[in-house]
Amino acid sequence: MNMPVTIPAKLSDALVSAAHLVVLTGSGISAESGIPTFREAQTGLWQRFDPLELATPTAFATNPQLVWDWYAWRRQLIADAKPNLGHQALVALQKYMPRFTLITQNVDGLHQLAGSYDVLELHGNIRRTICSVERIEVTDWPSGKDAPPRCPDCQAPLRPDVVWFGESLRPEKFKAAVEASEDCDLFLSVGTSAIVEPAASLAHIASRHGAFIVEVNTGKTPLTQFADESLIGPAGVLLPALLKILS
Ligand code: BJW
């Protein structure tokens, strides 16, 4: 897409002078790769599926096969998807910034596939499978009828390496995300409804520490009123426009 975009002067200045840019992404950045978001009317996953039946530890304990099969379906959707212009713009932005931290709530691994490195994955990665008891990654298991398959080591059911509601984020990942948010002078919230905690607090932490807050989203969110600039539109158009300021 090649639409003309006007970037406010205050944002251009903040970008050009930024010493540390933090970008927090959500499912909206992968929407243009064909991966459904969670909460959008009509297309969001939670419009069609109940998160309490699929994305909680209780759901997995109650109906492990349903949860495993649902994640297998999502894993296939993601396996077929490719990074888009939004992901690619972030790869290039990383090269221009003195310091750059990419924090994502996404489990699709598309940032890494695009070429981003040191990505802080707050909610895990659907491409990885772990033992539900030992929490260690399992890459190979005997093929058979079991869904979910069993851990070759302890026979516990395997599960996707994602963070469900009511589960804690990996402390070291969240600590790194908080530290980056406290340190940055420019914070970009991209394609997230900004309601899922504790990720949603990061923009507010950055703001309290004096960072310039920018939101990139196709609509408004609870963060919009706190943002210094809100760019309304697709990430695949707006992020390349931000990159153009630097290149
Ligand atoms: C575009 C676009 C385009 C579209 N371009 N934009 C404090 C207060 C209240 C509640 C809590 C709280 N602290 C904790 C909680 C509970 C809970 C929570 O936050 N609930 C809220 C719903 C209120 N949080 C947790 O349970 C977290 N754990 C925790 O806090 O542990 C401590 C604890 C332990 C025990 C008890 C209590 C606390 C864990 C949260 C885990 C979230 N997991 C999921 C599923 C991951 C696995 C999977 O993929 O299945 O993560 S839920 C889902 O939401 C997923 C996402 O990462 C996350 C965020 O969604 P996201 O990415 O923002 O998507 P959408 O759909 O919401 O928004 C998309 C946006 O994109 C929209 O705004 C569009 O407009 C936009 N868009 N196209 C730009 N092209």
Image (cartoon, rainbow, N blue to C red):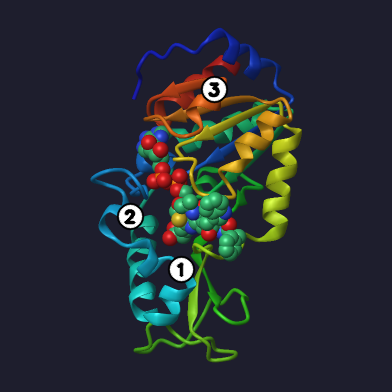
Pointer 2 residue Cβ closer than 8 Å to ligand 1: yes
Q: Are marks 1 and 3 in contact (CB under 8 Å)?
A: no
At which x and y percent is residue 120? 63, 49
Q: CA distance from mark 2 to mark 1?
A: 13 Å
Q: Is residue 123 visible?
A: no
Q: Say whether mark 1 is within 8 Å of ligand 1.
A: no
| Amino acid type, label 2 | Trp
Residue 148 spot, x, y in % from top left: 41, 82
Q: Which residue is mark 2?
A: 46
Q: Nearer the viewer, residue 121 or 193?
A: 193
Relative to 206, is 163 on the left or the right? left
What secondary structure is found at the residue carrying circle 3? helix
Packing grade of label 3 (10 A; few <14, some 14-19, many >=20) is some
Dot 1: element: loop
**Residue 43: x and y, percent?**
26, 47
What kind of residue is marked 3?
Answer: Leu
Q: Are marks 2 and 1 in contact (CB under 8 Å)?
A: no
The residue to which callout 1 is attached is 56
Q: Rounded to the nearest whole Å, what is the CA distance between mark 2 and mark 3? A: 32 Å
Q: Residue at x 58, y 47 (%)?
A: 199
| In this rendering, position of residue 110 left or right of residue 181 | left
Q: Nearer the viewer, residue 167 or 15?
A: 167
Q: 143 left or right of 181?
A: left
Count of residue discs: 3
Q: Mark 2 Cα within 10 Å, few/some/many (few <14, many 20+)?
A: some
Furthest residue to the top? Answer: 9
Q: Which residue is mark 3?
A: 243
Q: Choose the circle earlier in sequence order: 1 or 3.
A: 1
